[in-house]
Amino acid sequence: MDFAIIGAGMAGLACADALKDAGHHVALFDKGRGPGGRMSTRRMETPLGDVAFDHGAQYFTARDPEFRRLTDAWCAAKVVLPWPAAGDDAWVGIPGMNAPVRHMAASHSVAWGSLITGMVRSSNRWWLAGEEGKVGPFDAVILAIPAEQAAAILSLHDFPMARFALMARSQPCWTGMFVFDRPLDDVAPVIRNQGEIAWATRNSAKPGRGGPEAWVIQANACWTDTWLEAPQEQVSAMLLGALAEQTGRPIREPIAAASHRWRYALSAGTGDGALWNPGLGLGACGDWLLGPRVECAWLSGRMMADRIHQFAICPYGHVEP
């Protein structure tokens, strides 16, 4: 079968791996310029050279036995390393958090920078509509994108499935990135859930990193919601002030600063794992269907493939268990 997967993050690639292993043809489409999604690594030019930041997910866990085996394989391939400062079961991609996604994407056909705006079903097959015209046909389409984005597409084709997406609201997160000309002395490398700060860390001290003193500060959802539409420069200044407040001392002026607004950062998870309509050949997967962790995104993608494999879809819409 020919599958299209919209979204080449952890969930989409996990599903693609399983479908490809079963002998299917898979094409992935992602609006991002490269691998990462919410595991993205962002580069910033500074007077001390380019500096890379993990400005999305800060680490991931590997508690499921299958995902732990995959993580061990990534470790052997020097794609990830443990990060004890964040916890006994914390792992990071090296040299950036997007390394596992980049590693997975290398074995697939991914159209980066491809924004899919809609889908059309004709003669029991799917065509995708994008900025460069129609792409297809495909036997089935999997949406591996945030719930809010999936709902807009699902509502036109499977409203019961869209209702799941409409109920799975994500929390936003403002992230600040700062570079200093010298280390911030006597500041803990990790700060969690203190005041407006949900997470702050010395990014340059994470395993496999280096370079100038670089910090990532992520605000909690309540604070982010209050300042969601504020200018980036104002947000950067306020996040730096929040760090100073928690350390109890003034923070020197950074030599470079930026902020990024994640509108769809964390979802509580509906607990459904994955959604699949075998009659239409339409499905959805992602952390919003399981839980707000990288591992949950991977598990949801695998669950999606498992549900597909429970049914054989003929080209004319017949479904066989």
Image (tube, rainbow, N blue to C red):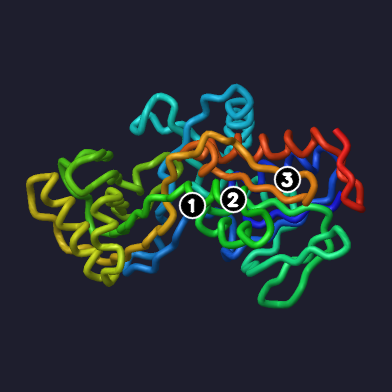
Left or right for 127, reference 233: right
Q: Position of residue 126 (x, y in %)?
A: 79, 61
* Residue situated in front as seen by the camera: 175 or 320: 320
Q: Are marks 1 and 2 in contact (CB under 8 Å)?
A: yes
Q: Quadrant of residue 152?
A: bottom right
Q: Position of residue 314 (x, y in %)?
A: 91, 47
- The structure residue drawn at horizontal position 38% and vertical position 65%, both measured from the top left corner, is 49
In the rendered image of this protein, does residue 128 appear above or below residue 108?
A: below
Q: Residue under circle 2? A: 9
Q: Residue under circle 1? A: 38
- The structure residue drawn at horizontal position 78% and vertical position 44%, both measured from the top left corner, is 278
Say which amino acid is labelled 2.
Gly
Say which amino acid is labelled 3.
Asn
User: Foreground mark, 1 or 3?
Assistant: 3
- Dot 1 or dot 2, earlier in sequence: 2
* Residue situated in front as seen by the camera: 146 or 70: 146
How many other residues sit within 10 Å of disc 1, few (<14), some (14-19) or many (≥20)?
A: many
How many other residues sit within 10 Å of disc 3, few (<14), some (14-19) or many (≥20)?
A: some
- The structure residue drawn at horizontal position 51% and vertical position 40%, both measured from the top left corner, is 294
Which part of the image, by quadrant, shows the C terminus?
A: top right
Q: Position of residue 212 (x, y in %)?
A: 32, 55
Is residue 258 in sight in this rendering? yes
Q: Quadrant of residue 300?
A: top right
Outermost residue on the left side: it is: 249
SS category of the residue bearing label 2: loop
Is residue 114 in sight in this rendering? no
Say which amino acid is labelled 1.
Arg
Whole-number angstrom distance, CA of label 1 to CA of label 2: 8 Å
Q: Residue under circle 3? A: 277
Whole-number angstrom distance, CA of label 3 to CA of label 2: 22 Å
